[in-house]
Image: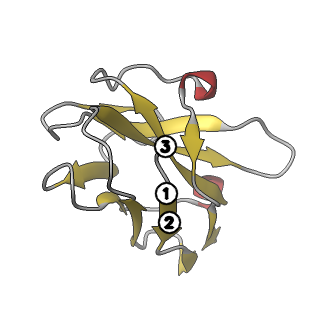
């Protein structure tokens, strides 16, 4: 079982930056991928980014490439989603998620078995 706690959402103007954090509970020796998804009102939950257990591999949605980065120092530290050059269309509830395994390119929400509570990100124009 992996428990996830997100933090760092808020309100920012277009062009600004925010950093989200996701802390995972310890107590497992299994490798797991950490990912971020988002869901805007009236829309389906969509993949944003993911990072492998070691932090050596990352994967991004086309809509955020070049603007967002995902990082982790090691498996015991939080995962960070650094969001730069934010746009109003980035407004959504952002969810941290985890799945057993090592490949970060699984981008469908159904592959992820553990979810955080979500944090709101609002980008004003």
Q: Nearer the viewer, mark 3 or mark 1?
A: 3
Mark earlier in primary sequence (3, 2) = 3
User: Looking at the image, which residue is at 33% across and 23% down?
Assistant: 101
Q: Position of residue 15 (x, y in %)?
A: 44, 69
Callout 1 crowding tier (Cα within 10 Å): few <14, some 14–19, many ≥20: many
In this picture, is 60 found above or below 70? above
Q: Position of residue 89 (x, y in %)?
A: 64, 53
In this picture, is 104 found above or below 15? above
Q: Say what secondary structure mark 2 lies in.
A: strand
- On screen, residue 33 versus residue 74, left or right, reads right
In this picture, is 93 found above or below 100? below
Q: CA distance from mark 3 to mark 1?
A: 10 Å
Q: Say what secondary structure mark 3 lies in.
A: loop
The answer to whether residue 57 shows anywhere in this view is yes
Q: Position of residue 10 (x, y in %)?
A: 57, 78
Q: CA distance from mark 3 to mark 2?
A: 17 Å
Residue hosting label 1: 4
Q: CA distance from mark 1 to mark 2?
A: 7 Å
In-front residue for pair 116/25: 25
The reply to whether callout 1 and callout 2 are in contact (CB within 8 Å) is yes
Callout 3 crowding tier (Cα within 10 Å): few <14, some 14–19, many ≥20: few
Look at the image and tell me in which quarter the C terminus lies: bottom right
């Amino acid at each position: 079982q992996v428990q996830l706690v997100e933090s760092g959402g808020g309100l920012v103007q277009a062009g600004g930056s925010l950093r989200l954090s996701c802390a995972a509970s310890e107590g497992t020796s299994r490798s797991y991928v950490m990912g971020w998804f988002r869901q805007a009102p009236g829309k389906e939950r969509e993949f944003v980014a993911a990072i492998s257990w070691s932090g050596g591999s990352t994967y991004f949605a086309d809509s955020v490439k070049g603007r967002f980065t995902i990082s982790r120092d090691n498996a015991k530290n939080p995962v960070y989603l650094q969001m730069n050059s934010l746009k109003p269309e980035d407004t959504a509830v952002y969810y941290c998620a985890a799945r057993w395994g090592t490949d970060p390119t699984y981008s469908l929400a159904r592959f992820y078995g553990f979810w955080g509570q979500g944090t709101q990100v609002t980008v004003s124009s």
